[in-house]
């Protein structure tokens, strides 16, 4: 009898302690909501109820429910069960889309080093000169394939917040500068530690064909760059073969020299990493198709603004396409006597490319191509819609398509149970002129978007919407 | 493929007979099939046909089928359904072949950073949308030898193309033409006439260094060739654990030169450097296909002829550089008389539009006959490029590449009416003229449309007034003496049409 | 003084024997020197008669089987039945044609030798406004270009200082200086010059957004608005300069010369602003042409438009203001890729049809001899042959106020003539005889000499 009483007493005290703890916790969590220190690790249970849900993977659900927990979409549907822990958001009048993906940007990366400038000549401004004059391919000019975006991420980059506020939860973040600028990583635009933002670190091996040399440093011409890249692939494959042979049998065999480029590019090829080839104008699209074939690489082309001219060739090549939605436009300061019909046609027709690609059955995604204000991205996509692109296809090009091309469509790009909880909640059609973005979920963290996103201040301070957490628990 | 010797190829009579016989039978077959589609058949009829190899045919006709010449003569008939081009009063000659051009290249034509840039390839950057291609078609040109620039002793790989304006880039290279490589000697290569502050002068800076650059490159190429030969031999003998030599894209084309699989086209001016390359070629056992420009070729013509090297030169350019100071317009004629196969080239998109005129000058300067003059831009460049079994003259079996003029092509008054490649009309003067109005109005419409899109929506009034204004921009008279006001500058910058 | 001079000058005292010795020396020298030296190039002016040829006087119909008589540097008589004076050197030109020598009104022959070699170039002075520098001063009478150019039938040129619209030399030059009319035959410039100050050169400043930097071999682009600002500044400067020249000219005329400072530049511009000397304005693009015309109208100067590649877009304006045009090299690309491919070939015919006075200029030194080729090409595209002939002979002379001296075969004019074996404009036509200032002029030149020398090289028997 006494034993049972002790146990009861223990249980009761535990219960009291437990209640106190819970009460304390709830008080403390309530006080945490006001404080500026928010520790990640909250259960992040949310449910959006009564909203129009556009999953992309299926037909829109008019009056639906999305349940999110631990950064994952738990349930989607007209009749999903809402767990009691979930914070319920009234979705009346709201539409939920998968978080948008910008398939090519440098947001999150520090600006590249300013190039060293050459001498000024009279009235002429100094021009960038390469810091070291390269005397041939063996100097590996402008080659840094080991620059992986995920390694240099700065979550405090104010542009991260801007992009997120414009509805972009994810991006292929790419290092800039050089012929082999580095490797692009798929990044979620949460503002946690950099490591928490990385979805896939080695997503793409990027290439640019911009000659970085000039008359006095190799390569100074487009054909020089192409010859150089060709040599790099040849050297890389040679190195793989030579290294294997050498490792198998050291004696009597000359040691293959160590070259960082060959090692890194070799690994990328082995991992079947997607190689990105520049292809903006018609001629360069042809070239990208031909080179992808010659170099036997798994490739995608980026740019494609003149793609409307050759949709069948692009379709036939089966190469996926990243379309630059920073459409070329007639400069306001144009010298009208010197504008050609060729340019006029490009400016007029470039936004019709996505519709043409859709019609030809090409798999393509949109990227921002240097647009500075992310709100312009959707405006530019709207221009493509005005030129015949269906809104459905436009949305796909910013969600499931990039996910598919980049090999992460098992976890991103649509609102399906099991996928990462990246969502955009709007008060209307995504492409509507007056539509506002209300909430953005990144990895299940909720960011409320306010009317005027204040200009990016110093990182970590005022103006940053705080992630919403539970407000008390019953 | 063995390099073709630099001689004219004459088709054997038997061959001609067989082809004619077959051609003659074709209409029978067509007839037998009834209403067969002859849309790929064209008859150019009743023109003065300049064959180059078999004289001129007055009131001649040419039958074209599947892009090739099926018949030539005074009695050629067209099958039903064939397209007919009325050649009355017109002159048909083989399309002009320009042995030195830099059109149709995307980006810089020079990889001028290093003295041996043989790893780069013009084929990688062919641009079929270059307007210069169209301009040259309008001048009767059908084929171009597209070369790397003259910045380096050893330049990039080169390619022969048909000027199929607007076709996909892979359709431009001349099928089966031997690939080339550009060499260059003289002032451009040694950077005589320019330099950059703070940049060390590049080796070579003298003609002596140019020779050594080439000798060094071939020395390395020979070593590379041997390395591969050794590897191949050992592998064939069954040796294991062999690592192949690393492929070197710079040396590979030079090995091809050594093996006779790639033609050297060498930009050169003065006699000493021309002789130099002949000497180096002998030392290393390779051949030079043509000397380009070769403005002092007349001084060493015998040596060139003895070595079977062609000369591709300008008609009458001179005195623009020291090395061009002893250039003479008699160069083409004099080299021809001494036994060199000579072509006249353009090296310039505009010059290429009147190569028929440039060829005619060799009648005045040096007394070439009419046919010899026309050969300078037809059969001779074809021979130099190793494609003379396909083009360069009008004969059965050859490609249907023609330039059609309204006067004798050697006359300054001749105007190209049509240019045809592989039987397809790529330039038609009448159609060009007919199209102009539509293109001009498309341009105006697009400009207006895009300007409207550019205007910020808040100022519709401003947009209207600018839109109506004609091209004359006149800042007010009174303002001339003072510094222009900001509004004036802005109006002028944004509003001038 | 005379005695001293005679003592110092042995030639005078022992004239005959010395003359004999010196002629022998000269003869020896003549063989030693390259053939193209000036010394034996021209005969003395005397009396010549060219007979039996078809004469294109360019005033009226050609004369079949006619005669031209030359005396003391001038055309004495021309016609079908002209009497041949006794003692005249007769040239039997049966089957040949006689034309006025051609006139290249925009060239830099004599001012530059090798374009890439700076030391040989005297075309463009430093600075933007150099109205006072005079081309004839720098004219190299022994330039290899002189015999080469005249051998092609060009007997006189307007050699023009400045950049002629190009980028070379003084990249910013606006007023290049005084262009001089020069015969391409004579002992030295004094002997050859026709008029030292024949025309003032002005290259109309163009709005340049793109430029090529030879030091880095790169092309740089700057904003249109910035380029436009620079351009306007230059135009204001031009306006100011011309206004100042006008005031200067007025002051000079009305006032006491002791009361004002002589200004060489304004002095040079004075006849231009007074309309006494034509202003040769080099402009290619349509908007530059319009601006230039407006400027010249305002400044009341006698404008000759040179270059004029886009003049076909401004025909009405040129017609209205009666502006003569010296057309730049016809064999050139259209200014824009959207322009008709034959815009430059067709333009001369279009301008002529609209009633505009045209002439052809080479705008080049080594290509001066292409002048007839430019004219001939234009004929193929619509310019009447007669007018084309005038456009390479008389028209430019007339524009420059030299029409009473040159350009046709009429008595009293300078005897600059070319005798050919065919149509002057045709490509295969050979020049057979040449007269400049009434002197029979050799066709020898550096290039012909090299040709003949190497034509006679013995054949190489064995491989080198």
Image (tube, rainbow, N blue to C red):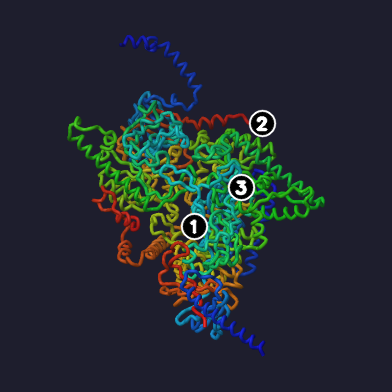
Instruction: From the image, tell me which residue sits under label 2.
Output: C461
Residue most toward the right?
Answer: B238
Instruction: From the image, tell me which residue sits under label 3.
Output: A139
Tell me how far mark 2 sits from mark 1, CA to CA: 50 Å
Q: Residue at x 58, y 29 (%)?
A: C456
Mark in the foreground, 3 or 2:
3
Residue most toward the bottom?
Answer: A1
Tell me how far mark 3 sits from mark 2, CA to CA: 50 Å
Q: Badges 3 and 2: C-beta atoms under 8 Å apart? A: no
Looking at this view, is A268 or B60 the one in front?
Answer: A268
Q: Please state the horizontal and vertical placement of residue C81, each as a whole percent of the image.
A: 35, 33
Looking at this view, is B10 or A6 the one in front?
Answer: A6
Looking at this view, is C165 or B153 the one in front?
Answer: B153
Instruction: From the image, tell me which residue sits under label 1.
Output: B428
Tell me how far mark 3 sits from mark 1, CA to CA: 50 Å
Q: Is residue B453 left or right of residue B236?
A: left
Q: Residue at x 45, y 44 (%)?
A: A120
* Chain bearing mark 1: B
Q: Please state the horizontal and vertical placement of residue C394, each as a whole percent of the image.
A: 34, 39
Q: Residue at x 47, y 56 (%)?
A: B429
Quarter of image, res A404: bottom right
Question: Where B4 sits versus B324, above or below?
Answer: below
């Amino acid at each position: 009898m006494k034993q049972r009483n002790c146990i009861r007493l223990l249980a009761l005290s535990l219960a009291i302690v437990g209640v106190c703890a819970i009460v304390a916790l709830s008080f403390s969590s309530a006080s945490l909501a006001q404080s500026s220190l928010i520790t990640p690790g909250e259960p992040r249970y949310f449910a959006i109820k009564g909203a129009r849900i556009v999953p992309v993977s299926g037909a829109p659900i008019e009056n639906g429910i999305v349940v999110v927990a631990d950064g994952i979409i738990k349930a989607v549907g007209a009749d999903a069960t809402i767990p009691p822990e979930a914070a319920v958001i009234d979705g009346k009048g709201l539409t939920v889309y998968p978080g948008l993906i910008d398939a090519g940007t440098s947001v999150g990366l520090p600006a590249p080093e300013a190039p060293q400038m050459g001498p000024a000549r009279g009235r002429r401004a100094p021009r960038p000169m390469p810091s070291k004059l390269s005397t041939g391919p063996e100097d590996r000019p402008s080659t840094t394939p080991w620059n992986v975006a995920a390694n240099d991420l700065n979550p405090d980059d104010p542009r991260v917040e801007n992009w997120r506020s414009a509805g972009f939860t994810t991006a292929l973040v790419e290092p800039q500068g050089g012929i082999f600028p580095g490797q692009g990583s798929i990044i979620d635009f949460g503002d946690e530690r950099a490591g928490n933002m990385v979805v896939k670190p080695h997503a793409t091996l990027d290439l640019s064909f911009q000659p970085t040399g000039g008359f006095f440093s190799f390569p100074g011409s487009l054909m020089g760059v192409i010859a150089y890249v060709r040599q790099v692939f040849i050297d890389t494959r040679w190195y793989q073969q030579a290294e294997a042979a050498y490792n198998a049998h050291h004696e009597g065999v000359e040691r293959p020299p160590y070259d960082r480029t060959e090692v890194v590019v070799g690994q990328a090829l082995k991992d079947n990493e997607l190689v990105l080839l520049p292809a903006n104008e018609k001629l360069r699209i042809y070239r990208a198709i031909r080179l992808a074939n010659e170099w036997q690489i798994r490739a995608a082309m980026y740019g494609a603004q003149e793609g409307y001219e050759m949709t069948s060739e692009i379709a036939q090549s089966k190469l996926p396409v990243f379309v630059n939605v920073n459409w070329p436009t007639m400069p306001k300061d144009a010298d009208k006597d010197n504008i050609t019909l060729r340019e006029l046609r490009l400016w007029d027709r470039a936004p019709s490319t996505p519709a043409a690609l859709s019609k030809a059955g090409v798999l393509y995604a949109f990227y921002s191509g240097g647009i500075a204000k992310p709100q312009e991205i959707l405006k530019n996509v709207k221009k493509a819609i005005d030129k015949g692109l269906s809104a459905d296809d436009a949305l796909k090009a910013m969600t499931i398509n990039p996910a598919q091309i980049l090999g992460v469509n098992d976890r991103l790009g649509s609102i399906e149970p099991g996928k990462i909880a990246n969502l955009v909640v709007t008060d209307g059609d995504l492409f509507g002129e007056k539509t506002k973005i209300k909430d953005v979920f990144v990895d299940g963290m909720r960011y409320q978007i306010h009317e005027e996103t204040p200009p990016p201040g110093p990182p970590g301070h005022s103006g940053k919407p705080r992630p919403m957490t539970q407000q008390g628990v019953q | 493929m063995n390099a073709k010797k630099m001689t004219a190829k004459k088709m054997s009579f038997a061959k001609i007979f067989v082809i004619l016989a077959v051609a003659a039978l074709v209409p029978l077959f067509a007839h037998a099939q009834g209403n067969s589609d002859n849309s790929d058949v064209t008859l150019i009829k009743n023109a003065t046909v300049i064959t180059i190899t078999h004289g001129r045919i007055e009131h001649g006709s040419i039958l074209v089928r599947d892009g090739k010449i099926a018949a030539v003569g005074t009695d050629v008939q067209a099958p039903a359904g064939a397209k007919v081009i009325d050649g009355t009063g017109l002159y048909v000659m083989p399309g002009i072949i320009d042995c030195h051009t830099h059109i149709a290249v995307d980006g810089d034509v020079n990889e001028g950073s290093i003295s041996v840039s043989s790893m780069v390839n013009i084929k990688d950057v062919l641009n079929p949308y270059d307007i210069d291609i169209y301009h040259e078609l309008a001048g009767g040109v059908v084929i171009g030898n597209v070369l790397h620039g003259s910045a380096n002793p050893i330049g990039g790989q080169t390619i022969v193309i048909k000027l199929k304006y607007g076709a996909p880039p892979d359709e431009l290279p001349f099928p089966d033409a031997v690939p080339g490589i550009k060499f260059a000697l003289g002032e451009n290569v040694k950077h005589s006439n320019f330099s950059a502050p703070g940049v060390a002068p590049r080796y070579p800076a003298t003609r002596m260094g140019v020779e050594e650059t080439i000798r060094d490159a071939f020395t390395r190429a020979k070593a590379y060739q041997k390395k591969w030969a050794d590897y191949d031999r050992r592998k064939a003998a069954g040796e294991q654990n062999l690592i192949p030599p690393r492929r070197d894209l710079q040396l590979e084309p030079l090995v091809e030169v050594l093996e006779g699989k790639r033609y050297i086209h060498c930009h050169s001016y003065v006699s000493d450097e021309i002789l130099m390359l002949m000497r180096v070629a002998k030392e290393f056992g390779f051949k030079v296909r043509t000397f380009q420009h070769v403005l002092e070729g007349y001084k060493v013509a015998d040596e060139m002829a003895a070595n079977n090297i062609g000369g591709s030169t300008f008609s009458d350019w001179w005195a623009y550089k020291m090395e061009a100071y002893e250039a003479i317009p008699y160069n083409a004629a004099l080299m021809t008389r001494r036994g060199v196969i000579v072509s006249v080239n353009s090296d310039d998109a505009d010059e290429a539009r009147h190569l028929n005129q440039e060829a005619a000058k060799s009648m005045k300067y040096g007394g070439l006959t009419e046919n010899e003059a026309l050969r300078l831009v037809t059969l001779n460049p074809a021979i130099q490029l190793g494609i003379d079994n396909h083009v360069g003259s009008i004969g059965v079996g050859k490609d249907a590449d023609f330039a059609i003029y309204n006067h004798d092509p050697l006359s300054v008054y001749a105007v190209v009416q049509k240019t045809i490649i592989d039987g397809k009309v790529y330039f038609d003067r009448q159609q060009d003229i007919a199209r102009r109005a539509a293109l001009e109005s498309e341009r105006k419409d697009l400009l207006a449309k895009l300007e409207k899109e550019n205007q910020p929506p808040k100022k519709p009034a401003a947009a209207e007034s600018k839109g109506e204004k004609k091209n004359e921009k006149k800042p007010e008279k009174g303002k001339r003496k003072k510094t222009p006001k900001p509004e004036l500058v802005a109006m002028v910058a944004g509003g001038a049409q | 003084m005379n005695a001293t001079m005679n003592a110092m000058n042995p030639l005078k005292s022992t004239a005959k024997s010395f003359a004999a010795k010196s002629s022998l020396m000269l003869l020896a020298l003549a063989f030693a020197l390259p053939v193209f030296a000036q010394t034996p190039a021209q005969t003395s002016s005397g009396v010549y008669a060219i007979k039996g040829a078809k004469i294109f006087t360019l005033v009226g119909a050609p004369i079949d089987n006619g005669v031209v008589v030359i005396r003391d540097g001038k055309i004495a008589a021309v016609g079908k039945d002209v009497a041949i004076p006794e003692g005249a050197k007769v040239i039997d030109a049966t089957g040949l044609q006689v034309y006025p020598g051609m006139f290249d009104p925009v060239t830099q022959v004599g001012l530059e030798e090798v374009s890439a070699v700076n030391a040989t170039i005297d075309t463009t002075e430093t600075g933007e406004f150099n109205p006072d520098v005079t081309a004839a001063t720098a004219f190299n009478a022994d330039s290899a270009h002189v015999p080469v150019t005249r051998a092609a039938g060009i007997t006189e040129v307007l050699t023009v200082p400045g950049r002629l619209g190009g980028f070379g030399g003084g990249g910013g030059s606006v007023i290049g200086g005084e262009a001089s009319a020069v015969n391409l035959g004579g002992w030295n410039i004094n002997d050859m010059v026709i008029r030292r100050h024949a025309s003032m050169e002005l290259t109309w400043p163009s709005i340049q957004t793109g430029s090529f930097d030879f030091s880095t071999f790169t092309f740089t682009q700057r904003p249109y608005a910035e380029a436009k600002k620079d351009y306007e500044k230059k135009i204001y400067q031009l306006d100011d300069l011309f206004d100042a020249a006008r005031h200067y000219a007025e002051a000079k005329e009305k006032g006491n010369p002791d009361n004002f400072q002589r200004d060489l530049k304004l002095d040079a511009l004075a006849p231009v602003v007074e309309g006494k000397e034509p202003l040769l304005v080099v402009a290619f693009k349509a908007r530059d042409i319009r601006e230039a015309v407006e400027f010249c109208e305002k400044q009341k100067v006698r404008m000759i438009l040179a270059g004029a590649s886009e003049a076909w877009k401004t025909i009405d304006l040129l017609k209205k203001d009666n502006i003569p045009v010296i057309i730049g090299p016809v064999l050139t690309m259209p200014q824009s890729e959207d322009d008709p491919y034959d815009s430059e070939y067709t333009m001369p015919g279009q301008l002529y049809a609209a009633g505009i006075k045209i002439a052809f200029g080479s705008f080049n030194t080594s290509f001066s001899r292409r002048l007839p080729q430019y004219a001939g090409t234009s004929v193929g595209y619509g310019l009447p042959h007669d007018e084309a002939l005038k456009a390479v002979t008389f028209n430019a002379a007339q524009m420059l106020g030299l029409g009473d001296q040159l350009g046709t075969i009429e008595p009293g004019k300078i005897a600059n003539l070319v005798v050919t074996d065919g149509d002057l404009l045709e490509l295969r036509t050979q020049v057979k005889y040449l007269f400049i200032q009434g002197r029979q002029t050799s066709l020898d030149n550096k290039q012909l000499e090299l040709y003949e020398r190497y034509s006679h090289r013995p054949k190489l028997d064995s491989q080198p």
